[in-house]
Amino acid sequence: MLKRREFMAVAAAAALFVSSSAAFAQDTNLTIALPSPGGLGYFAIYNAMGEGYFEEEGLTVETQSVNGSSQVIQALLAGQAELGHPGPGPLLNAREGGADLVYIFNYFSRSQFNLVVPEDSEFHSPTDLKGKVIGVGTSDGAEVAFVRSIFDAEGMTEGEDYTFVTVGEGGMAVAGFMQEAIDAYASDTSGVATLQLRGVDLRILTPPEFRGYFGNGYVVTREFMEDNADVLERFGRALVKGLRFGQDRDNLEATLEHAKLGNPQQLEDMDFARALMGVYYDLTAATNPDMGYGYMDPAAWERWQQTLVDSGDLDAPLPDITQAYSNQFIEAWNAE
């Protein structure tokens, strides 16, 4: 996460920022900084490119992959990108350090981590796993902390009520279940896809309140948001069209083909890509269909902030967390 001490370097880069208040022509170029080169994960962008939705809005969109959310934030502050795709934690860290960045579209609307068991198991809730063994990919992965927090909420203590065992990722997790070495698994997005592809049907035990720990989404500087509302409306309309196109299972093959625009290597194993897309259907679905794609629940932001304060990643709650996000464009983006 972007800590205060990193802002000395960021501030120097931000000094080069060219004001976004210049008027945009109808043909507008936009650069989006992404924290990884995962083409399929950002399928809405590549559908909007491949299906011509950006072109219809007079937009030419370029994606640039960097190394993680902190570099996404630095690119935004330095004026190297108009939009970025960081996680909510790094964004709140950046705001604590003085950066006026605004989260405008909740893309990964659900947590990418889950506590899972085989569908035919006897376990139906986290408390059913008392005394059981939980497999993890690595001993210090983010999914471990996420699943530990689920057990903490149930009053269950690691080492007393359950045990973590490092079994590795992908096929190793499959072997762990097959050999009955583990009873459950702390999984990320690709882990779920791998297990399902290998024939392990899963039951997700993640409680609803934890699934609300949404992931990365679209972020801009406040200056850009205020000076270029029309551009963002056009961008969001095209993005929502790309999401809707991808969420339609009849468009799966076209969505996979468009994703090659972002990362063709990720689509070399098409069976795995199809399984991974099955996970992304869930991760990017609208959490509140009445509000539409991209909507942000204020209570979810409060939960994120409290979690970061409790873990020490934020020194204290922000003066006004509502400044960290905006639902300003949601209605216009989702209009049909």
Image (cartoon, rainbow, N blue to C red):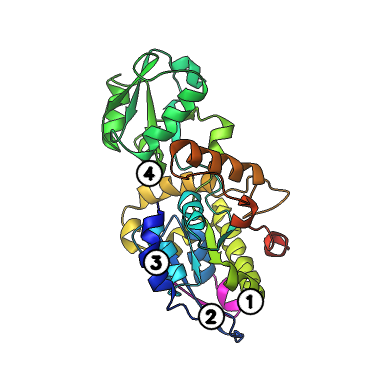
Mark 2 lies on residue:
19
Mark 3 lies on residue:
10
Mark 1 lies on residue:
227
Q: Earlier in the sequence, mark 3 or mark 1?
A: 3
Q: Determine whether 164 is above or below 137 in the image.
A: above
Was residue 60 drawn as part of the magenta stretch in this picture? yes
Q: Is residue 9 left or right of residue 50?
A: left
Q: Earlier in the sequence, mark 2 or mark 1?
A: 2
The 10 Å Cα crowd at callout 4, few under 14, some 14 to 19, many 20 or more, is many
Do callouts 3 and 4 mark residues in contact (Cβ within 8 Å)? no
Could you tell me the amino acid type at mark 2? Ser
Report the Cα–Cα distance between label 3 and label 1.
Answer: 22 Å
**Whether residue 100 can be seen here:** yes
Do callouts 2 and 1 mark residues in contact (Cβ within 8 Å)? yes
At 61% across and 66% down in the image, what residue appears? 236
Secondary structure under tag 4 reads helix
At 65% across and 70% down in the image, what residue appears? 233
Over which residues does the magenta segment extend? 51-62
Residue 327 percent location from the top left of the image:
67, 57
Could you tell me the amino acid type at mark 4? Ser
